[in-house]
């Protein structure tokens, strides 16, 4: 039997090496490396091993981003956040030992289906909100939540992955980062921003889950900027989406971040109450 507890007990920091793992099939290729399914020899626990070449880290000058991602992700232990169990390196590569998300990217599911059902969308939004409450309590702002950064485990449970753009902060931030379509107005306008940027993104994702496209998508970046800053939000007639869902999206997608629904209020919203699977497992 495979045991996660055993894996965690067997992993005094810095003691891992490639000898501890049997490498299986490739899971995917990212900008900075490849990911393989792997099995830890002693515990037989299945993980995802992300391999990043040091050369790439130097080339793209991502030392700080990677270190931050590793430091933040190891401290986060929540059912909807992908675990980083540890890491090790050799002369050329860095290996991240990650929780295995059997069902891959939520993005792929969304593209395959076109859009999600209200039940699925509400379940994912509740999972995300719970994970963000946890992150914000630990003073972590993710800032780059998008379908590509959301993975699904074998039970269809949502896992936030990729903390490369997150920051641990108690004060307001000024840097602009993240993907354009999901950026809050205060980030587009390079103003100080805080936790409310993640609340904004929940509205964008909720819209994208239900309609299949993000709300401010446009031909050019300039046009997307304009649509975001003017909160040029409209709901197409198809697919048919409930007025409660539209209400939630409209109350999160507000220019003034202090007026956006809080994470607590999102979790208590009637649309969530009515549609989200209470055990937050989205069966397919
Ligand atoms: P990344 O380098 O993080 O963008 O990962 C590249 C691809 O590998 C992603 O698109 C996923 O499909 C896959 N992948 C990454 N991490 C995991 C994981 N923990 N479990 C399963 N698949 C993963």
Image: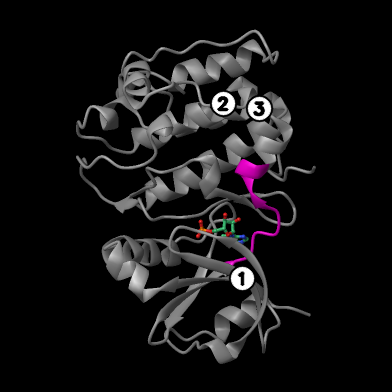
Could you say where residue 19 lies in the image, as x and y percent from the top left? 57, 92
- Label 1 and label 3: CA atoms lie apart by 38 Å
Seen at 50% across and 58% down, the residue is 30
Q: Position of residue 194 (x, y in %)?
A: 28, 37
Between residues 15 and 79, which one lies in front from this camera angle?
Answer: 15
2 or 3: tag closer to the N-terminus: 2
Please say whether residue 101 is one of the residues in the magenta stretch: yes
Q: In the image, is residue 121 above or below residue 86? A: above
The image's colour scheme reads one colour
Q: Which of the two labelled residues, at mark 2 and mark 1, occupies the earlier sequence position?
A: 1
Q: Nearer the viewer, mark 2 or mark 3?
A: 2
The residue labelled by disc 2 is 213
Q: Which residue is mark 3?
A: 273
Q: Quadrant of residue 120?
A: top right
In the image, is residue 158 above or below residue 29? above
Mark 1, other Cα within 10 Å: few <14 / some 14–19 / many ≥20: some
- Earlier in the chain: of badge 1 and badge 3, it is 1
Q: CA distance from mark 2 to mark 1?
A: 30 Å
Q: Residue 271 magenta-drawn?
A: no
Q: Quadrant of residue 55?
A: bottom left
Q: Mark on residue 36?
A: 1
Q: Name the quarter where the N terminus is drawn.
A: bottom right
Name the residue rendered at 54%, 14% in the picture: 247
> Where in the figure is residue 193, as x and y percent of width and height?
25, 35
Residue interval drawn in magenta: 99-108
Instruction: Classify mark 3: helix, strand or loop.
Output: helix
């Amino acid at each position: 039997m495979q045991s996660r507890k055993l894996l965690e007990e067997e992993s005094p920091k810095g003691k891992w090496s490639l000898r501890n793992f049997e490498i299986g099939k490739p899971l995917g290729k990212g900008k900075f490396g490849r990911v393989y399914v792997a099995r830890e020899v002693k515990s037989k626990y299945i993980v995802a091993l992300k391999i990043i070449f040091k050369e790439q880290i130097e080339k793209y000058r991502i030392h700080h981003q990677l270190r931050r991602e590793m430091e933040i992700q190891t401290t986060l232990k929540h059912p909807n956040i992908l675990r980083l169990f540890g890491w090790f390196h050799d002369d050329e590569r860095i290996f991240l030992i990650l929780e295995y998300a059997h069902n891959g990217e939520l993005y792929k599911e969304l593209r395959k289906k076109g859009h999600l059902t209200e039940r699925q969308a509400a379940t994912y939004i509740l999972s995300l909100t719970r994970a963000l409450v946890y992150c914000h309590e630990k003073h972590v702002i993710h800032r780059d939540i998008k379908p590509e950064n959301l993975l699904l485990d074998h039970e269809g449970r949502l896992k936030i992955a990729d903390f490369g753009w997150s920051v641990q902060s108690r004060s307001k931030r000024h840097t602009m980062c993240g993907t354009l379509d999901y950026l809050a107005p205060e980030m587009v306008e390079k103003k100080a921003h805080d936790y409310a940027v993640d609340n904004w993104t929940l509205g964008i994702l909720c819209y994208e889950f239900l309609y299949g496209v993000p709300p401010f998508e446009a031909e050019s970046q300039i046009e997307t900027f304009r649509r975001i800053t003017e909160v040029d939000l409209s709901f197409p007639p198809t697919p048919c989406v409930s007025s409660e869902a539209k209400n939630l999206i409209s109350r999160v997608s507000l220019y003034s971040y202090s007026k956006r629904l809080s994470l607590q209020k999102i979790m208590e919203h009637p649309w969530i109450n009515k549609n989200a699977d209470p055990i937050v497992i989205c069966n397919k």
